């Protein structure tokens, strides 16, 4: 019973914060509280220590409310901005040929081998649903979104900044050339990430976010081990993989719900039936708290 009280407090906290943020009542810095995730472990420990003690319920409620209040203050007051505004300078941004100032195109002649790409943005809808004949393409129809691009050897970092936080329909579309095997990283907060990678090749994919809605569609893995790491809090994540794709899932989550279609628990992993025999496979690692995870086969 007392364990459900702790869970209820955390769910109410994240729900209220996300709702107020979405309706622009407060501007909550979800990124700033990610590094305090061990507090959730402390919360679980307090619950285990005092669940059978006299006045245990009062202690558990007080401790969890205090932790949530601390995180609320951090998220509301922190100056640690998720979209790295200090690194963005639109006057010196790399702008290749595009249809508007809020588009970036890297031509195929500027391609690199083993490309590493990272994208950082908050409060936006990011869509990946097609490939491009260019090496890389990013664009937005919303004039309040601007891009800054940094290239270092085979590393490409793209930063998105929303100048008008109250603007609606902050859509960003990304496209990658299908003939390259990408190393991808996305840092998002209070955003929707809808990505169809069934036509895009990648060897590693990392997703970091809070209060995010993540939808991933994958094709068959292209490497012996293709890794996917998802680090989120108060987020919903749905991953669709082909029925014949081999996959293992490792989870380090707290206060989360999980639905895995076609997986069986083997030691500390959830595996598909063909995982050990497959020559190419996915390794998916899920970390975080107060999340909802669904993996389905198509």
Image (spheres, rainbow, N blue to C red):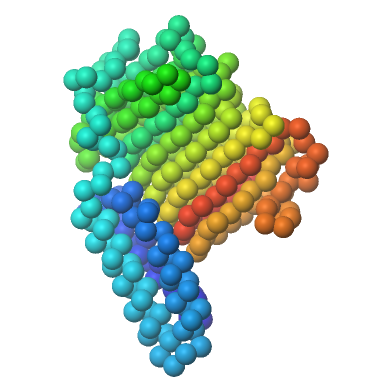
Q: Residue at x 27, y 52 (%)?
A: 28
- Residue 9 visible in the snapshot: yes
Q: Does 217 appear above or below 289?
A: above
Q: Residue at x 74, y 36 (%)?
A: 244
* Residue 66, x across and y down, in percent: 31, 72
- From this view, report whether residue 117 is shown above or below residue 255: above
In this view, the residue farthest toward the bottom is 54
Residue farthest top in this picture? 109
* Image position, residue 51 (x, y; %): 49, 84
In this picture, is 167 found above or below 72? above
Q: Nearer the viewer, residue 24 or 156?
A: 156
Residue 273 screen position, x and y as percent: 78, 46
The residue most toward the front is 153
Q: How many marks?
A: 0
Q: Residue at x 28, y 66 (%)?
A: 70
Question: Which residue occupies 45% across, 6% down?
Answer: 109
Q: Quadrant of the C terminus?
A: top right
Side of 259 relative to 58 (left or right): right
Q: Is residue 190 left or right of residue 298?
A: left
Q: Is residue 209 above or below residue 176?
A: below
């Amino acid at each position: 019973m007392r364990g459900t009280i702790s869970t209820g407090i955390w769910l109410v906290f994240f729900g209220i914060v996300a709702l107020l943020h979405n309706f622009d009542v407060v501007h909550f810095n979800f990124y700033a509280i990610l590094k305090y995730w061990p507090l959730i472990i402390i919360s679980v420990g307090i619950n285990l220590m005092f669940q059978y003690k006299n006045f245990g319920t009062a202690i558990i409620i007080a401790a969890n409310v205090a932790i949530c209040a601390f995180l609320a203050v951090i998220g509301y007051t922190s100056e640690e901005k998720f979209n790295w505004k200090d690194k963005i300078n639109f006057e010196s941004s790399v702008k290749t040929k595009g249809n508007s100032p809020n588009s970036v195109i890297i031509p195929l002649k500027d391609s690199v081998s083993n490309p590493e790409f990272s994208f950082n943005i908050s409060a936006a809808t990011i869509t990946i649903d097609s490939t491009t004949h260019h090496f890389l393409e990013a664009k937005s129809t919303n004039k309040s979104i601007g891009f800054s691009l940094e290239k270092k050897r085979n590393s490409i970092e793209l930063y998105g900044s929303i100048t008008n936080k109250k603007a609606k329909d902050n859509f960003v579309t990304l496209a990658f050339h299908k003939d390259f095997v990408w190393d991808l990283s996305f840092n998002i907060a209070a955003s929707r990430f809808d990505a169809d990678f069934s036509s895009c090749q990648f060897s590693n994919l990392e997703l970091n976010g809070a209060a995010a809605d993540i939808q991933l569609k994958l094709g068959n893995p292209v490497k012996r081990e293709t890794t996917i790491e998802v680090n989120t809090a108060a987020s919903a994540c749905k991953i669709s993989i082909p029925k014949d794709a081999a996959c293992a899932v490792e989870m380090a989550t707290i206060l989360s719900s999980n639905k895995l279609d076609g997986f069986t628990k083997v030691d500390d992993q959830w595996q598909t039936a063909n995982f050990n025999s497959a020559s190419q496979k996915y390794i998916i690692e899920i970390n975080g708290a107060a999340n909802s995870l669904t993996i389905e086969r198509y």
